[in-house]
Image (cartoon, rainbow, N blue to C red):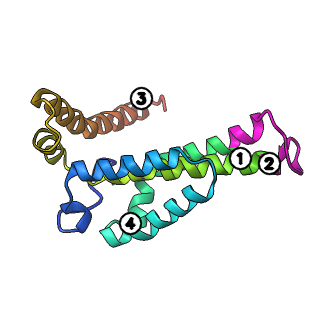
Amino acid sequence: MRFSEPLATRETALGRLSPVAKLTAAMILSLALVSTLDPVAPAIALAGMLLVTPLFGISLSRLGRRAWPLAIAAAGMVLTTVLFTAERAGEPLFWIVTTGSLADGLSLALRLAAVALPGIVAFATIDPTDLADALVQQVKVPPRFAIGALAAFRLLPLLADEWRLLVLARRARGLA
């Protein structure tokens, strides 16, 4: 699966929504989750999002294939927080890992996933041409900016293909 393929078709409920509405909803949810410090709100938002996503015609396996860099970032955040935290509160678990640092790391990773996943779903279901049209018609941005956004969206698949060709060329030369 190419990284830039749309997750939802136009026949689904999410595919019929305006790109501006999708981006606005993702931004509101993300900003609300950034402002909270407890792990309960991101956990509820993430669970709700994962429960509702199949209703919009997006399978969880396709979403997982699209969001795997997010899982690596969350794991890195947990590891970094556990190993390099200044406060070592709680019971010691292993070497320098404590229950407090592990809880903090898991809370940050959960917040990262809950903040980033709405954006991943929103951008993965937006057609670039529809985005440019909606930016000009609904948000009243200058057409030059909308065409720039359209060009950026259309170049992403080309960059992925070029990267894949570079990897194959290095492999053919015996460098990879």
Q: Is residue 158 visible?
A: yes
Q: CA distance from mark 3 to mark 1?
A: 45 Å
User: Which stretch did the figure color magenta?
Assistant: 79-100
Does the magenta run of residues contain 99?
yes
Residue 104: image tag: 1
Question: Nearer the viewer's eye, disc 2 or disc 3?
Answer: 2
Q: Is residue 158 left or right of residue 97?
A: left
Looking at the picture, tell me which residue is in the foreground, 37 or 154.
Answer: 37
Percent coordinates x, y for residue 77 in the rendering: 63, 41
Residue at image x 28%, y 37%?
156
Please tell me whether mark 2 sits on a helix, a strand or a loop: helix
Binning the other alpha carbons within 10 Å of mark 2 as few (below 14), some (14 to 19) or many (20 upward) gives: some
Q: Is residue 5 left or right of residue 90?
A: left
Question: Nearer the viewer's eye, disc 2 or disc 4?
Answer: 2
For the residues labelled 4 and 3, say whether their Cβ atoms are less than 8 Å apart. Answer: no
For the residues labelled 2 and 1, say whether their Cβ atoms are less than 8 Å apart. Answer: yes
Going from the N terminus, do you reach mark 4 or mark 1 first?
Answer: 4
Looking at the picture, tell me which residue is in the foreground, 95 or 175.
Answer: 95
Q: Which residue is mark 2?
A: 100
Going from the N terminus, do you reach mark 2 or mark 4 first?
Answer: 4
Amino acid, disc 4: Thr
Q: Which residue is mark 4?
A: 53
Going from the N terminus, do you reach mark 3 or mark 1 first?
Answer: 1
Quadrant where the N terminus sits is bottom left
Q: CA distance from mark 2 to mark 4?
A: 32 Å
Q: Which residue is mark 3?
A: 173
